[in-house]
Each structure stands twice: as structure tokens, then as C-alpha cells.
Image (cartoon, rainbow, N blue to C red):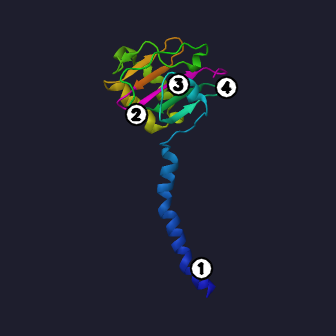
């Protein structure tokens, strides 16, 4: 009797596992959500500068081997101001948001602005990276690229998106 049950149930169990496998594998590989959240970094970055509803993705590493993708992206509230905030002058450049804002779309001469976003897809996630790219290519948002360290700042109230991203050199967060 037990053998008969095993013979009847075993094929059904294998069928259930194999039929669900492609979806499970797709979900694991898609990585549409935030890859990493550094608790406290986003709050420090936007403290007194900008209020937000949700941290979408953030990463801040003090001791990175090789290049580090330092970023913080948030979802703004529905009542976000149409103009970007003024930059808070802070000693620590890693905690500054904003600067001399420009309107999107990103100028053809400034295509280097896309580099940090493209190089950080593995940490930011493909869905959020695609949204950032779309915001930079369409009118209606603001961006600032710090020529000192290449940090890209984005403020897009219509898309309810704000954040910054940069490639930090080895040994530097």
C-alpha cells in the first residue's frame, strides 16, 4: 500500500516542483527590488533637506574593496515640491544632496551622467535603474552631476523619485 502511494504521489511532486521552477528561477534572477539597504545612510543624507515616503535602494560602505557603488534612492510623497531642494552644505561630501540643478533631459554633451547608473545596476536593481534612465531622458525632472567626484543627483517630483549615486574609488566609501 505504501509503495502504491509513493508511486502515485512521487510523479505529482516532481511535476509540481519542475512546473514551478522556471517562475522561481525567474524571480530570483530578476532582482527587481532593492539589492541592499544601508540603514541610516538615506536618513542622514536627506535629513533637513527632503522628506520621503520610502527608501527604494541604498548602499554605503566604509571599507569597500575595489570600486563601490554608493547610492540612495527614495520614493517622494505625492505632495513633493515641484522645485528641487537647495543643497545642504555639509562637511562630509557623502552626505550632500543637490547642487546646481539642471532640467532634464540630460544634454547630449553630458552623457557621462548616465555612467554611475549603468555601472550600479547590480546594486540598484534593473527596474529602478531603468526608471532612473527614463527620468534622465525625459523632460520634467532635475539633475546635478558633481564634476568633482562624478556623483549624480536626481530630483523628479512627477515620478516621485529622488536620489544620488556615485562610483567611489577603492578604499573610499
> Disc 3 marks which residue?
46
User: Depth check: 58 or 30 in front?
Assistant: 58
Q: Earlier in the sequence, mark 3 or mark 1?
A: 1
Label 1: which secondary element: helix
> Disc 2 marks which residue?
131
Percent position of residue 17, x then y:
53, 64
Q: Does residue 131 show up magenta in the picture? A: no
In the rendered structure, which segment of residues is drawn in magenta?
Answer: 156-173
Q: CA distance from mark 3 to mark 1?
A: 59 Å
Q: Earlier in the sequence, mark 4 or mark 2?
A: 4
> Disc 4 marks which residue?
62
Q: Is residue 30 above or below residue 169?
A: below
Q: Point out the image quarter for the N terminus.
A: bottom right
Q: Earlier in the sequence, mark 3 or mark 2?
A: 3
Q: CA distance from mark 4 to mark 2?
A: 27 Å
Extreme left residue here?
139
> Disc 1 marks which residue?
6
- Residue sitting at x 55%, y 23%: 167
Disc 3 + disc 4, Cβ < 8 Å = no
Label 3: which secondary element: helix
Amino acid at each position: 500500500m505504501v509503495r502504491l502511494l509513493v508511486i502515485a504521489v512521487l510523479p505529482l511532486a516532481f511535476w509540481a516542483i519542475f512546473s514551478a521552477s522556471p517562475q522561481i528561477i525567474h524571480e530570483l534572477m530578476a532582482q527587481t527590488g532593492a539589492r541592499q539597504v544601508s540603514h541610516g545612510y538615506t536618513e542622514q543624507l536627506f535629513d533637513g533637506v527632503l522628506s520621503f515616503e520610502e527608501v527604494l535602494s541604498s548602499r554605503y560602505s566604509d571599507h569597500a574593496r575595489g570600486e563601490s557603488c554608493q547610492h540612495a534612492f527614495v520614493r517622494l510623497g505625492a505632495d513633493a515640491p515641484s522645485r528641487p531642494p537647495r543643497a545642504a552644505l555639509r562637511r562630509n561630501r557623502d552626505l550632500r544632496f543637490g547642487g546646481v540643478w539642471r532640467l532634464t533631459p540630460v544634454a547630449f554633451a553630458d552623457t557621462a551622467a548616465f555612467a554611475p547608473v549603468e555601472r550600479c545596476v547590480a546594486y540598484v536593481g534593473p527596474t529602478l535603474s531603468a526608471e532612473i534612465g527614463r527620468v534622465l531622458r525625459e523632460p520634467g525632472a532635475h539633475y546635478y552631476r558633481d564634476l568633482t567626484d562624478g556623483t549624480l543627483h536626481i530630483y523628479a517630483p512627477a515620478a516621485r523619485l529622488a536620489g544620488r549615486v556615485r562610483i567611489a574609488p577603492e578604499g573610499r566609501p
